[in-house]
Image: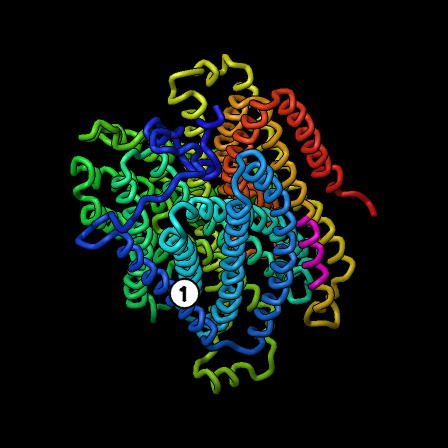
Amino acid sequence: MCARIPAILTLLTALSAAPAWAAEAGHTSELDLVLPDLRQVVMMGVSGRSLLIFGLFVCVAGLAFGLRTFTQLRDLPVHKAMLEISELIYETCKTYLITQGKFILVLELFIGTIMVVYFGLLRGLSPFRVVTIIVFSLIGIGGSYAVAWFGIRVNTFANSRTAFAALEGKPYPCYAIPLRAGMSIGTLLISIELLLMLLVLLFIPRDLAYACFIGFAIGESLGASALRIAGGIFTKIADIGSDLMKIVFNIKEDDARNPGVIADCTGDNAGDSVGPTADGFETYGVTGVALISFILLAVPSPEVQGSLIVWLFAMRVMMIVASVLSYAINEGIQSARYSTAAKMDFEAPLTFLVWLTSIVSVAITYVASFLLIGNLGDGSLWWKLSSIITCGTLAGAIIPEVIKVFTSTNSAHVRECVEASKEGGASLNVLAGLTAGNFSAYWMGLVIAGLMGIAYLVSLTGLGATMADGRPLMLAPAVFAFGLVAFGFLGMGPVTIAVDSYGPVTDNAQSVYELSLIETIPNVKQEVKKEFGFDIDFEKAKDFLEENDGAGNTFKATAKPVLIGTAVVGATTMIFSIVMALTHGLTENLSQLSILHPPFLLGLILGGAVIYWFTGASIQAVATGAYRAVEFIKANIKLEGVEKASITDSKRVVEICTQYAQRGMFNIFLTIFFSTLAFAFVEPYLFIGYLISIALFGLFQAVFMANAGGAWDNAKKVVETELRMKNTPLHEATVVGDTVGDPFKDTSSVAMNPIIKFTTLFGLLAVELAVSLGQQSPHATHLLAVGCFLISTIFVYRSFYRMRIKSV
């Protein structure tokens, strides 16, 4: 059985068991698979290798675009008072990231140990290959970490420049600067990820490239999980700690005397910038590696393998071009419409950009596929594969539209939260938000199921057809279809990241404006007029910054389900692969994939239990940390005789946030790590049920929590901007709802994505480890299952009893 279970790269995607033709070719293990010679692939008159070398230049151009935009943002005009605040935010972000980097390396020791045991001791790989896998896992971690660092630097440039540009009293710069920052991050992120993968594909020996991809994927997954989960805990500790001061002391939002505000700004970057950036990097990388794995394992013909791999990477290159082109077109249109406008709907141009990019990407998908693989198979494969990708690409535009129904400042659900608060206070506000979240999960489920269903139907139209030599074009074509849907979800990569990154910039911009005390600086109007050449309009500036923050909230909310959906679609295909393996292509043991097989049913129950534990553990870390932050702020805030909180007090709040983020993350990671090993060691079919449950419970829990939180967040924004009722009982009620929603939308929900992927990825490795050990000693696996489970319960215990709020 062990030889039939997908090895570590199979962990990354939808793969079936190694087919008979692979064994005949001498493949004793998936780890021994060799990439096809891309020089033998000819497309449009040139070799596949030459085409992908051209792709390297596109990646370099993407990097140049990102870096050029970075320097343009840095060089934008900004008042020194605002610059001082944004640099302080960056310094605290740096401290946080350095601390997190050390923490991730500690977690790598756990994963590295399992890799050495499995690959080195059980599978007998040479020390060189084992070291290669570990080195590339460090490269994967480094990639996630580097793009996260770049993201906070860009955003902390953009926040002060946006705040300053707003002083002119025109809305367009408030929109253009955050979006430019987001495109810089998104384009550079995708370009780096694709560049690294192309370098491995083109310049690492073909018999070693597979091991490099293995390590790269594992490192990406670990780095993204740690940064996403810890960042989510950090940001909501700071946000709640800062927001509650508005009620306790009846002070304004982002009051400079509140030492929690700097921590809140740092958290906006740690949670809403660092987390999504690292998560996006991992998602794009793992999806690409996964599809390569499927092609190598499930496509018999080396010629077809090479053509599909070249096509796959060519499509990824073209998607960078599509996003940058769409951004350029959109900016030309929006500049003509709004550059001199006195008022604008900040959500409208972002919506237009998303749909434009989707349409352009779909068009390029069909054209490029026709040119590259028009003659592959029976001549119809190009449009079938393009149609499957399109299901995912359109999802990148359809899902945001569905989510806006529940989270936009103009949505009926958000208005319901406001109306409910007028008479029912915080209680009815919370109930209205819970309603929005539950309704949104229903519609998101229909959208994802519908798109995957269409892809499945297309896969039945000949993707598994028999070729002239009697071999199938590919095995398990539905699996490949699901993988391509996930690929299509990510088709608008730079733009998806851009609209997600828009939110933390707009949030920080509003804070920078308040913290700079720009309105109180003597002769500031004359100074700005003389140095920058425009007249200040404070009232319009504040209005535009607040309205734009609402748009940022909405589009942060719309980007989350895209990544969550990708995780679930990817997990679905990964789980299907191990089902194919364990059942020898659905020919044996099918009765064990049923609720009539008790271990399978128990696995379904256990997966749901772990998702709900994770939700509680992550919220508990936020609640305890927020309690300590509030405790410190209340004891040290000075409202008389000072204009700003001391830097020392502000940094202390950041330390509290970091401390509880790391404590929470450590408990969560080790519980997931040891639970995965424990359930895999018990029984393979129990573990399949566990993985299915993790994906499905995780999907609906994540969507429910993200959109409930988004509704509460923008309900507060409506009260602040449209109704102008700050510091009223209505405002207090919506602030309470927002603080409930904070860990919903920015901690527990967003962390489901890396949790689902990491559990499935590491879990499939654990299954193969368990089967290998079980062949030698069945009793040993059961003893290990008990041992790992007991260790996991220690950290479950710690996630509450060592994290709960206690008197000190």
Left or right: residue 660 compared with residue 380? right
Residue 726 seen: yes
Q: Position of residue 649 (x, y in %)?
A: 73, 64
Q: Position of residue 700 (x, y in %)?
A: 49, 34
Q: Residue at x 76, y 56 (%)?
A: 632
Q: Tell whether 400 sits left or right of 41.
A: right
Residue 660 colored in magenta in the image: yes
Using the rendered view, name the quadrant where residue 590 is placed.
top left
Place of residue 175 in the rendered image (x, y in percent of width and height, measured from the top left): 41, 63
Query: Does the stretch in magenta take in 296?
Result: no
For the stretch drawn in magenta, the main secondary structure is: helix
The foreground one among 606 and 203 is: 203
Residue closer to the observer: 157 or 159: 157
Region rendered in magenta = 651-662
Q: Quick one: label 1, few (<14), some, or many (20+) residues within 10 Å?
A: many
| In the depicted structure, whether residue 12 falls above or below residue 554 | above
The residue type indicated by label 1 comes to Gly
Mark 1 residue element: helix
Residue 714 can be seen, yes or no: no
Query: Circle 1 sits on which residue?
Result: 66
In this view, which residue lies farthest toward the right? 808
Residue drawn at (55%, 32%), measured in percent from left and top?
766
Q: Is residue 427 above or below residue 469?
A: below
Q: Give the vertical position of 103 relative to 433 (above or below).
A: below
709 sits left or right of 404 in the view: right
**Residue visible at 34% across and 71% down?**
340
